[in-house]
Amino acid sequence: MGTSGTGGAARTPSIDPDAVARVVDALLDPALEPIVELVITADRANGTYEARAVDGRVRFHREADGRAEGGESGESSDRGDGATAWRFLDVEVEGRNPLADTATDRFSPLADERAHPWPSRTEQSYPHAHEHIAQVFDHPAAPDVICLHTAAHNWEDHGGERGEHGSLGVVQARAPLVLAGAGIRRDGIVPRSCRLVDVAPTVLALLGAEPGPGVGPDGYRFDRALLRRQDGIPLTGIVDDDAEPPDHVVGFLWDGCNANVLYDLVARGEAPNVARLLDQGLAFGHGAMASLPSVTLANHTTVLTGAHPGHHGILHNAWYDRATDRQIITNSPATWATAMGLLSPDVETIHQAIHRRWPEAHTVSVNEPCDVGADYSTFEELRSGRDIARPPQPEDLPFATQRFVRPEKSYEWSSRVDHTGMTQAIDAWTDGAGGDGALPRFCFVNFTLTDAAFHCRGPYDDMARASVHDSDARLGRILDAVERSGAWDRTAFFLVADHGMEDTNPEVTGDWSTALDACGVPYRDEAYGFIYVGAG
């Protein structure tokens, strides 16, 4: 599954536009206003896209722009790397333009976020909305309609978790990003934002990878690419020009971790090991924005490939493929180990890009499904049928808050998974990634506990805070292993998440399936919001 050669839309079967219009009208019924934020469609043949809300709509067009950043409609700016990109132009607005506000600093820091619970559509901002909408429809299995839920909506009928994500809104899109160690400026928390697609090219640039021919954001040739397909750009202003570049990079992903909550806990002294990193580096105070959909495996893959979901092939946690008439599920215990079989051959992971430049390098992927090219991978061990040491029983787990481990099965499971990941990462820095004393050039460690806890009771609950405490302690043990290896002064670190997490309103429940059923059009609603019209 990949994009077309020019980065434009792939050909799809003809869909009855009247049927699509009926589905859109059903979703925009004023009765659904508390739960439906935006309804998005595309005319892929003509490169136009439409976002609708109950109080207005905007239709926009994309076109190649040799020096455009493509982050905001009607604007272009010098990327600074010579890449071509897309320029987005609003061509028709009726009523309120629902995508007019793309501010990245909205609801930051935590006090501001908490002062604006469940922001309305007129308060909301959608960073990089035009770019993030358009890229989804580049995928050959893109839906016909995308329905995005409001900030307040609680999916009571689908589990009723208090914390939610998946939408374009800034709190759900905003992930933390901390960079530290060798080669990084020590600036503390800076009032900046970036995108998750920028992480992979930044890591490669930090390691000193020479750019070369590749494919840029618009799908055309790009002669200064760091990855085979590169939608992101290396972040500027983070490198200490007086320091030597690092020999090693260690990346941590804390799944589902709300950026404002994490930064606040660091400031309060409740995450001393994250603070240890921040003392030697910087953090993007306004976060790193997830691609649409702001969900787990789509954005894990974005972090590790520098490409959007519509380009790297992992479109969502689940979607429907008309070409094969099958549902595809990637983000489940049954499919994590094999999900990268869907990765587009047009992209490459950080692991592959490192090996292309430094064939003798060792790379490590701990508890991360997007592991293509890694020399050691947790999931490759599982695919190969090799045994992985089982973690201690819940009552014997170190760095596990017992008041939540015992009653909450998701907290217990994630605590045990993360303990195993911690031991694997420590082993990589103790014994060498290749078993011959060679230390990892790149090591990536995925922690799951924050996602479980922030989902269960929301980002502001004691459980969320406990998950940060526990994850921070495990982080500290890995940092200690890097220091014991003797490579500390030659190692850079980054800590990121795959998306944000927003508190929902338990009183705002409901489902749009009743309205869709009543409109008389066959449809499939995959992952609650990717709607395929005419599919049964």
Image (cartoon, rainbow, N blue to C red):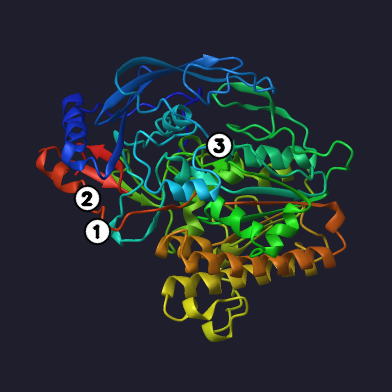
Crowd around label 1: few <14 · some 14–19 · many ≥20 (10 Å): few
Badge 1 vs badge 2, beta-carbon distance below 8 Å: yes
User: Against 48, is 463 above or below?
Assistant: below
Indicate the quadrant where residue 14 lies: top left
Residue beneath the point at 65% across and 58% down: 266
Q: CA distance from mark 3 to mark 2?
A: 32 Å
Q: What residue sits right under mark 2 in the picture?
A: 511
Q: CA distance from mark 1 to mark 3?
A: 33 Å
Left or right of residue 137: residue 368 = right
In the image, what residue type sits under mark 2?
Answer: Asp
How far across and down, in percent of the image, does residue 366 sit? 63, 61
The count of marks equals 3
* Sequence-first disc among 3 and 2: 3
Element type at marker 1?
helix
Q: What residue sits right under mark 3 in the picture?
A: 307
Mark toward the viewer: 3 or 2 = 2
Q: Where does the N terminus fall, quadrant-wise?
A: top left
Left or right of residue 123: residue 360 = right
Q: Is residue 296 visible to the viewer in this orientation of the structure?
A: yes
